[in-house]
Image (cartoon, coloured by chain):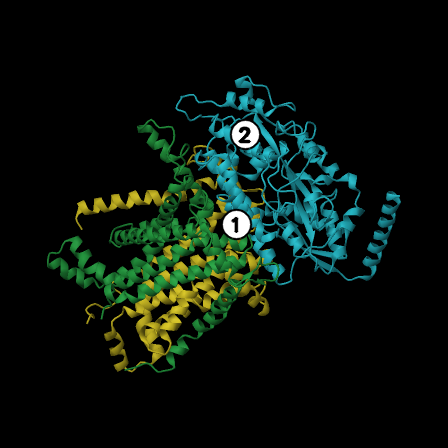
Chain colours: A cyan, B green, C yellow
Amino acid sequence: MKKSLMIFALVLLMTALFTAGVFAQKTTIRYFMWDPEFQEMERGLVEEFEKENPDIEVEFTALEPTNYWPKISAMAAAGELPDVFNMSSGYIDQWAQDGLLMNIQDKVDELPQDDYFTRVFSTLRYPDKTESDMYGIPYAWVTTVLYYNKDMFDAAGVEYPNEDWTWEDFRKAAEELTIDENGDGVPEVYGHWWYGRYAHVEPWVYANGGRILNDLKTRIDVDEKAREALQFLGDLSNKYNVSPPKKDVVGIRQQDMFPLQQTAMWVDGSWNIQHVRDMGQGAFDWGIAKVPQGPSAEPGEYEAYGWPDSLVISKESEHKEAAWKLIKYLIGKNRPVDSYMAGKVPILKSLAESDEWLETDNDPEEIEIVLELGELMGRTSFTIGWGEWRGYADTGGSGMNGVLDSVTNGEMTVDEAVEEFTEHGNTVLERYYEE
Amino acid sequence: MKYKKITPWLFLIPTLLGLVFFRLGPMLAAGLASFTRWNVFSPPKWIGLGNYIELFSSGTFRMILKNTLIFSGLFVPGVMIAALFLALLVNNRLRGMTFFRGLFYLPVITSVVSIGVIWSWILSPRFGLLYQLVSKFFNIARLPSFLGQPEYALYTLIFVYVWKMAGYQMILFLAGLQNIPQVYYEAATIDGASIWQKFRYITLPLLTPTTFFVLIISIIMSLKTFELTYIMTQGGPNYASTTLIYSIYVNAFKHFRMGYASAMSYILFIIVAVFTYLNFKYKKRWVHYSE
Amino acid sequence: MSLGRKIILYTILIAISFTTLFPFLWMFSSSFKTMGEIFSLTPSFIPDNIFAEGMWNNYKSILQEYNFLRFIFNSFVVAGLAALGQLFTCSLGGFAFARMEFRFKEVIFALMLATMMIPIQVTIIPEYFIMLKLNWYNTYLPLIVPSMLIGSFGTFLLRSTFENMPSSMEEAAFIDGVNDWQMFYMVFLPNAKPALASLFIIAFMNNWNALLRPVIYIDKPDLYTITMGLAMFKGNYGTQWHLLLAGSVLSILPLLFIYMSMQKYFVRGMLTSGTKG
C-alpha cells in the first residue's frame, strides 16, 4: 500500500516536474547555510541540483553562526526570510512557536522512512517531541562518544572500554591512567577531562536514564538519576582527582586536551573525530566507545545523547515546492561524503554506511559505534531559552555550564550547583513557558 | 569680527542629517523596544516597564553593573597613563622613532582573536609562558588561574585591554603634544628646568584639552568594548567578568532578547550621560585652553 | 640629547616593543603553520616549514580559493571613503562647534556624543529597516553613509583641536577679510593636520574592522569585506585557524600601511609660536 502510494507520488512529482519544466519560467529560491567551511562543496551540490532542475535557480549564501543568526533574524523581522535555511536544535522550538517555519510533516511522510536515521527527527517536532508535526528535517546528526587513548591504556595495562563497562570500571581506569610523576599533587596526565559543557555532561545524565527537565520540558527538574550522574562527575574532579579543574584548562583549547595527550579519556561530540585526527596527526593510537551505562539506568535500555543539524522552509516562502525539492536533494544520495566532517553523520543511512564515510583505515576503527548510537538516540534538553539557561558558547561562563565549572574547581558542591542552576534556569524558562 | 549667522548650520548639515536619520531614529526605536519583549524575528510585544523591573530585581544585573564600574574605573586611568607615557616616549626626536611608533600601535590592530589566544596561553596556570618562567625559580605545580578564577578574571581582562588599547590613546596624545609650542621648552631649558619640571609645568597643563578629550573617549571606549571578553573568558566564571556591553551583545544576538538588551543599553546610556555631564561640568577646573 | 639619556630611552623603547610585538609575531609565524602546529603545547616561534615546501600554503589557499584580494580591495574602498567622509564632516562640524556661537549648540553636541553610546547591537535592526526603505540593500551605502554623515569621535576631536587654537589667528584673518569658508579651510584646517591624521587612522581602522553592518547588509560574495572574508574560516563545529591567521595578517597590513603613511603629519610646530595670549 505504502509502496504504491509512493510510486503514485513519484509519478505525480515527475509529471509536475515535467510540466513545470515546459511551462514555468525560472523559480528563484534562496538558501542560507551556516557552515562556510564547507561552502565550496555545498555550492557544488547546489549547482548539481540546478542542472537537474533547470527551472529552479538557487541563490546560495554561507555565513558563520555568529553572523548567521543576526542576519537570519533581521531578515525574518523584515519578512525576507530565505526559502530554505539551516536551523539549530536549540532554536527550533522558538521559531516553530512563532509560526515562521513551514510544517513539513506531509512531505516527510512521503520519504522512505527506513532510509533515514529517524530517531533524531524528534528534535524537530513541535510542540510535543513524540507526537507533533515536524518543522524541519536533518541533513546530518551528531552524537557524543567516549574517546580514549589506546597507547595510554596499553602503557598502564588497562583494558580498553567495552560494552559492559560500569561507571565503577570507568573510574578505576581513570585512576590508573592518571599520572603524577613528580608527585606535586597536580597530575601531568589525567584519566579523564570534563567541565560544565553540555556535550561533556548530558551524555552521562542520559546514560544513567536521568532527566534535568520535567516531562513537559518546561522547568528544570533534576531527578535522582541525573543528580547521581553529576555527583559521579563531581567526584572524578574532587574526590579522586582524575579530571583537571576547569580553571587550569586555560590557554589550551578544551578540545585539544585529548589530542595533545593531556588526558587519557574524554567525552564530547562525535564531530571531534575529525578534530582529533587533525590535531593528533597520528601521534598516538586512539579509539571511541559508548559512554558507559550508569548504575541506575534500565538494563538494556541505553539512551544516547545527540542532536541533528537541520534544514527548514520559511512559512512565507512563495516557492515551497521548489524549496522542498532542494531540501530533498540536499539530504539525498548526491551529497558528497566529504561535505561532512568525520564524525558528523549523514541523515541518509546508505551514505553513512558507505566506505567513504566509515574510512575504516583511519582512527578510530570503532567508528560504527557512532551509527549504532544513532538508533539509540533518546531525549534532549533543548527548550526555548536553552542557550541561556545551559550557558552555551558565548555565555559558556554562566548558567548551568558556569556553576558546573565551579564544581570542577572545587568551589561548589554538586548539590549547591544543582540548586543554583535550577533556580537560574527556571527564571529563564518561566519567561517562555507559563505554568 | 564674527561669523555669519547661517554658517554654523551650513557646516553642520551632514552631521545633523546623520544625527537625525542614523542616530536618533534608531535610538528612539531601541527606546521603544526596551518596553517590549522582542526576539527580533517576531513582532515585539508591549510589556511596559517589564524589562526594567527585571533588570533591577536581578542579582546578576547588579553584579554586572558592579563589574562595569570596576572595569571603567581601572581601565580609564590605566590606559591614559600608559598611553601618555608611550606618547611622551615616541615624541622624542630619535633615530628610528617612526618604527617604534609603529610597534607600539601594533596591539591596536593585531586581530582580537590572536591577542586573546596568545594572552590566554601566556597566563595559563600550567602550560603558559609565565608558568614556565616562574617555575624555573620556584617549585610550584601551578599558577593561580588569572582567567579562570572569579577573583582575578576581571582584572586580568582589564590589564589585557589596557595593553591592547594604549596605542590608540597614544596617537591622540601624540597629536596633542605636537600642538605645544616648542618655544616654551626652549625657554624652560634656558631657565634650567629639569625634565620633570618641564613635564609638570609645561606639558601637563598645556595638554589638558587633549587629556580631557582622551578621558571622555576612554570612558566611552571602556563601556563599549567586549570582543576580547568573548575570546578570553566568555564573561565567566559565573559572570565574574561580564560587563554591561558584553551582556547587551549576548542578550541581543545570542539569547535574542532585544527588548531586554535595549533596556540595558538605556541604562548604559544614562551612566555615560551622567559621567560625561559631570566631566563637562568640572572641565573648567582643570582644563586650560591657550587663551 | 646626552648619550646616557639616549641609551636609557632606547632600552625602554626596545623593552616595550617586545611586549607589543610578541602577539603579532605569534600571529605572523602561526600564519605559516598547520593547525596542529599552531596549538601545540609549547608554541614554537619558527614554523617547521619555513623556507621549505608548503611554506606559503595557507596564503595560497586564501588568495586563490577565497578571493582575498577582492575582499581587501572592497574594504579599502569602504573604509577609505568612510574615513575621507569623516574628515570632511567632522572637521566642518568640529569647527562650527569650536569657533561659532549658535542656538542649541551644546544640546546638539551633547546629543551627538550621547548617541554614540547606544550599542549598535540594539540599533542595527531599526537601522536595517531604514536601509531597506532606502533600497540600499546589497550596496556599500549602508556601510559608508552613516559613518560619513556623523562621526561623534571625530567631531569631538576636531572641536577640541580647533578650540585649542589661539584666537589671535582668527582675528588677524578677519582683518585680512577672509570669508567663513576660507577661515575654516585656509586658516584653521592646515593647522589641524596631526588631529586629522589621527582621525583618519582611527576612522579607517574602525570601518575596516566593522563586521555587523557588512553582515546585515551584504549578501553577494563579490561585495564581501575583509572581515566577512575572515569570518568564513569559522564554522559551526570548528575554526580553520591556519587560514584565519594568514587572513588576519593580510588584513592588518593595510592598517599598518595607513598608520605609517600618516606619520609624516605628526610633526611638531605646525602652529606658529608665541601666539599665546
Kindly give the residue lying farthest to the top in the view shown.
Answer: A157
In this rendering, would C193 be left or right of B239?
A: left
Q: Chain of mark 1?
A: C
Q: Is residue C120 visible?
A: no
Q: Amino acid at mark 2?
A: Phe
Residue with the mark numbered 2: A232
| Secondary element type, mark 2 | helix
Res B170 quadrant in image: bottom left
Give residue A419's mark.
none
Q: What is the x, y in percent for residue B92?
A: 24, 53
Q: Quadrant of residue A17?
A: bottom right
**Viewer-proximal residue among C253 and A121:** A121
Residue at 31% across, 63% down: B279
Circle 1: element type: helix
Q: Is residue C21 depicted above or below C138 in this figure? A: above
Q: Quadrant of the C terminus of chain C?
A: bottom left
Q: Residue furthest front?
A: A435
Q: Callout 1, which amino acid?
A: Leu
Q: How many marks?
A: 2
Say whether mark 2 and mark 1 are on the same chain.
no
Left or right of A9 on screen, residue A209 = left
The chain ID associated with circle 2 is: A
Please tell me which residue lies in front, B159 or C19. Answer: B159
Q: Residue sitting at 68 percent across and 36 percent down?
A: A377
Q: Measuring from the top left, give residue B146's x and y in whole percent.
A: 38, 39
Q: Position of residue C157 (x, y in %)?
A: 35, 65
Which image quadrant for residue C11? Answer: top left
- CA neighbours of label 2 inside 10 A, class few (<14), some (14 to 19), many (20+): some
Residue B78 appears anywhere in the view: yes
Disc 1 from disc 2: Cα separation: 42 Å
Residues marked 1 and 2 touching at CB (< 8 Å):
no
As drawn, the label of residue C230 is 1
